[in-house]
Amino acid sequence: MSSELFNQLVDAHYVPLFRFALSLTKNSSDAGDLTQQTFFIWAKQGHALRETAKAKSWLFTTLYREFLRGRRRSERVTALEDLSPAEADPAAPEIDFVSGLDANLVVEALQEVEETYRVPLTLFYLQDFSYKEIAEMLEVPIGTVMSRLSRGKAQLRAALARKEGGTRGKVVPFKNNSARQSS
Amino acid sequence: MNSQQAKFILQGYRPDGADAADETFADALAQARQDAELGQWLAKSTAFDRVVVAKLNDVRPPVGLREAILAGGRVTIADQPPAAKLGWRGAARWVVAASVALLGAVSVGLWSRRVPANGTLPEFALADARSLHGHLDFGPLSAELQTKLSEPTMGLARLRMPDYAALRSTGCRTVKFQGRDVLEVCFKRDGVWFHCYIARREDFPTVAAALTPSFAEHGKASVASWADAAHLYVVVSKSGRAALEKIL
């Protein structure tokens, strides 16, 4: 593999890969290590990818596999009928408070989502992959991806609501409730 | 499909509209246009997703991560054996293209990895191919062309070039020769990789073209070049002239 090609790959993918890693590891330092490790594996093995190569998918899949390595993976297949009523018929989320949140708080909320749902949800929000590609990467049926996105979004909304409460208490301690709600 | 089922499906609809053409969402989207409550839910849900996407995009990797990856990658690459060890394991027999043309000088020195300032397109192609050790997908049309070129029964004469501009705009690997774009697509036949370079004739009006196949070689590397009415083609093999002749 040429250094030039490697540089192109790094520049094209290291930022979204880091974001994905951050959602998995919940730690910036570990996420950096995981991102590096993924590219080093590419540098060592990537030239073997000669079929209709999909470098981006390969990198994300490898990062996820590296994350899972050494861990016991608990497969939880969720069907629509397994979802709670609130998850199966989700309420429209309120976005005003989310818009005002710091990006780090949103990422923290994302990290509070259970890993089973967090992985497809993060890939979904990175917008680089369709639900079909996510299903392929995670080796689960398409319906399972849909279910996990549904439950993941429900968990994310709940986590964001908790963040909102915490933020209000810390940032605007001197305003009364009505003032805070109208601000 | 009821509203609940539509919401379930639409959870997978990306907020940037990338899935707009996906048939899976068609019915649910149509329903959302007719069902005011569902439409309102979709609008809010999509707006929420957009906000999360924007927040996620605000997250920046730590300073120095890119440099650390590049430095580590260089060390790792340097530690690898030469990548071009593709054995020539018996090439498939190709149907010879009916129209083969000559591109520039033949039998010139194609051994240098650096392209001379006044080099020909075949020289350039060989030097470029020699610098490649990976075979990547650079776009959907590129992948489609790669698949066509890899078909063992397809002769080059029957190759129908996809639209050049579309191929370039959708991410096909593009290199510069004499200030003009040249597209490159790699493909494999019977375990052996080839690199196909495609240029527009109008970009190189002084290049003499003929309908006779032309070969140039050095060592195990070999180049074939030809043209059709609109395009110039160069195919490079690192596995020698015999390999190339077999596929032509």
Image: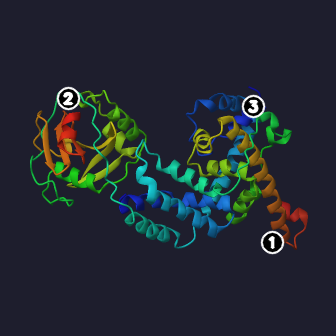
Q: Chain of mark 1?
A: A
Mark 3 belongs to which amino acid? Answer: Gln
Q: Chain of mark 3?
A: B
Q: Which residue appears at 80% of the width and 62% of the height?
A: A163
Q: Position of residue B109 (x, y in %)?
A: 11, 54
For image coordinates 53% across by 69% down, the residue present is B65
In the image, is residue A5 above or below residue B225? Answer: below
Disc 3/disc 2 C-alpha distance (Å): 55 Å
Say if residue A86 shows up in the picture.
yes
Local SS, label 3: helix
Say left or right for B36 vs A139.
Answer: right
**Residue drawn at the location 20% of the way across and 29% of the way down:** B97
Q: Quadrant of residue B244?
A: top left
Looking at the rendering, in which quadrant would you find the N terminus of chain B?
A: top right
Question: Which circle's residue, 3 or 2, is located before the other in the chain?
Answer: 3
Q: CA distance from mark 1 to mark 3?
A: 40 Å
> Residue A128: x percent and y percent?
55, 48
Query: What residue is shown at x 31% (from left), y 51% (from top)?
Result: B85
Q: Which residue is mark 2?
A: B96
The amino acid at mark 2 is Val
Q: Which residue is mark 1?
A: A171
- Does dot 1 land on a helix, a strand or a loop? helix
Q: Are marks 3 and 2 on the same chain?
A: yes
Q: Are marks 1 and 3 on the same chain?
A: no
Q: Residues within 10 Å of mark 1 (few under 14, many from 20)?
A: few
Q: Are the numbered discs 1 and 2 placed on the same chain, yes or no?
A: no
Mark number, residue B5: 3
Mark 1 vs mark 2, CA separation in Å: 75 Å
Asked if the residue under mark 3 is in contact with the one under mark 1, i.e. CB atoms within 8 Å, the reply is: no
